[in-house]
Image (spheres, rainbow, N blue to C red):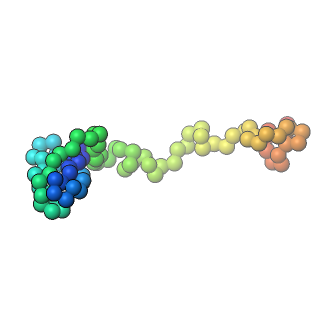
Amino acid sequence: MPIYEYRCNECEKEFEVIQKFSDDPLTECIYCSGPVEKLISLSSFHLKGSGWYATDYAGKKSSGPADKPSNSCDQNTSKASGCEGCPSSSS
């Protein structure tokens, strides 16, 4: 559902409201009941239901190549001075 921004002409507060496309625009401020105007701003929306990153994928751990340990040393040392236990230093 789209999120619309409004500004009150009396108290000058700005606020957001989630509305359906078919809903009529607000005419009264939610704080002071004064007249409001709809602002033109960047589009934003609220994802509902399953199948979105926030509901289905955000908490899962990947088992891809990025999760596997690297066989190369990330320290700037030569194999001669090497790091103890580093796979690159033991050949």
Res 75 quadrant in image: top right
**Of the pair 55 and 26, the residue shown nearer to us:** 26
Answer yes or no: is residue 18 visible. no
Res 74 quadrant in image: top right
In this rendering, position of residue 22 left or right of residue 55: left
User: Residue 52 placed where, x, y %?
Assistant: 35, 44
The structure residue drawn at horizontal position 37% and vertical position 50%, both measured from the top left corner, is 55
Position of residue 74 relative to residue 9, above or below, is: above
User: Residue 25 placed where, x, y %?
Assistant: 12, 47
**Of the pair 27 and 4, the residue shown nearer to us:** 27
User: Residue 4 placed where, x, y %?
Assistant: 22, 46
Locate the C terminus by quadrant: top right
Res 81 quadrant in image: top right
**Of the pair 9 and 67, the residue shown nearer to us:** 9
User: Residue 84 placed where, x, y %?
Assistant: 83, 48
The structure residue drawn at horizontal position 10% and vertical position 51%, both measured from the top left corner, is 27
Position of residue 44 relative to residue 32, above or below, is: above
The structure residue drawn at horizontal position 24% and vertical position 53%, both measured from the top left corner, is 14
Locate the N terminus by quadrant: top left
In this rendering, position of residue 33 left or right of residue 42: left
In this rendering, position of residue 4 left or right of residue 86: left
The structure residue drawn at horizontal position 82% and vertical position 46%, both measured from the top left corner, is 83
Answer yes or no: is residue 75 visible. yes
